[in-house]
Image (spheres, rainbow, N blue to C red):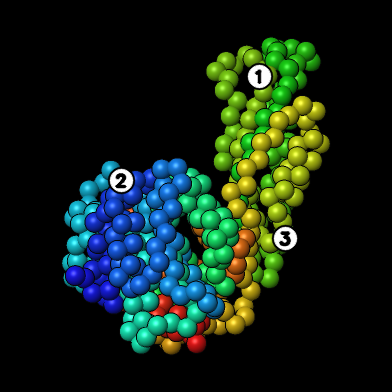
Amino acid sequence: MIDLTDPLPLAQSLIRCASVTPADGGAQDALSDMLGRLGFTIHRLRFGDIENVFARLGTGGPHICFAGHTDVVPVGAANWRSDPFGGDVRNGVLYGRGACDMKGAIAAFVSGVAQHLEKGAPKGSISFLITGDEEGPATDGTVKVLEWMRANGQIPDFCLVGEPTCPVKLGDMVKIGRRGSVNMTIEVHGTQGHVAYPHRADNPVHRLIRVLDALTSAPIDAGTDWFEPSSLQVVSVDVGNSATNIIPSSARAALNIRFNDAHSGASLTAWVRATVARYADRFDLESSVSGESFITKPGPVVDILRDAIAGATGINPKLDTGGGTSDARFIANYCPVAEFGLVGTTMHQVDECVPVAELRDLAKIYRDIVAAFLA
């Protein structure tokens, strides 16, 4: 029987489950077995084809939750030096898909809690929200589990997500927020015609060019206290015209805006719509918000994280809101949330890996965070 206080065999057990999203590969079973041995009450929550786990130890407050995902991205076409689902250790480094993102952190979660429980039953509650749908559409994972948690009175006082947040060295960064993200597609309609007789047509490409110039010619904002300036990126312009003598009837563009807490997905959609309307009488605009911006401002909870990290590593971590989106964007709608995990340099890469010493150090940090939060 594996030692639950050591994250290495736990991480190896999880890595050996080929849980390429949306497949589970036995990862949720392995995790449930670990948490069951620690006395957690296990709730297996299947939504659609996705396996999820919510597990809790204790019934009172304060209540801290660890959140993450067992699904991983595909291994890719390039050759690995070892089995990507083998969990091999070479020269003190653990290799395998998910070692960094984020089966290593889940193992450190479990190990840190197991180390804390060696001193006795916890004051308050510890829970785990672990999904199998973070690397995929993210519709039947954390979102659905949170709805279940709210309906069943399981919302924590604070949630820590174990995404790989550190850019260079373990302990150098904590994510206390994330930018929002909205995708839009603009289709400008015109009137098709012969290029030699432009007065008989209405060229939508020319209108779309003016729209895109207006959207990109000046910054959206100058940033806010905790966020960098919002960024609009045009990712596609498509006319679909194979002829050189035809003015097309329509032209499309797609864009993404990563935005700070000065905006919402709705406000940016309204801004883009108004801009397009200045240059085009006929157009369609589709908008999809994948997440709003959120921030857990510095305070007692963030201080617990910083103190635990500094105590274990000697590093005072930078508080940051950059990068892409994570499931923390969903959790932020229910309770304060932050993210802290491993160094992310090999996530999604061939030969994804984590030094074993770093994995064990992370488990100790999580142990100290639990101890401080439940003190």
The image shows residue 150, relative to residue 201, as above or below, that is: below
Along the viewing direction, whichever of 148 and 263 lies nearer the viewer: 148
What numbered label is drawn on residue 248?
1
- Is the C-beta separation of discs 1 and 3 under 8 Å? no
> Is there any visible trace of residue 330 in the rendered image?
no
Task: Indicate whether 17 appears above or below 239.
Answer: below
**Residue for point 61% across, 63% down:** 334
Q: Nearer the viewer, mark 1 or mark 3?
A: 3
Give the amino acid at mark 2.
Answer: Gly
Helix, strand or loop for disc 2: loop
Mark nearest the camera among 1 and 2 is 2
Q: Quadrant of residue 206?
A: top right
Q: Which residue is mark 3?
A: 262
Nearer-the-camera pick, 354 or 223: 354
63 with respect to 221 (left or right): left
Q: Quadrant of residue 241?
A: top right
Real-space Cα separation, disc 1 to disc 3, in angstroms: 38 Å
Q: Measured from the top left, where is residue 106 in percent x and y?
A: 37, 66
Residue at horizontal 29%, vertical 63%? 33
Whether residues under marks 2 and 3 lie with C-beta atoms below 8 angstroms apart, the answer is: no
Instruction: Give the mark nearer the N terminus: 1 vs 2.
Output: 2
**x and y, in percent, of residue 21 in the image:** 37, 47
Q: Earlier in the sequence, mark 2 or mark 3?
A: 2
The residue under label 2 is 76
Disc 3 marks a residue whose amino acid type is: Ala
Foreground residue, 29 or 314? Answer: 29
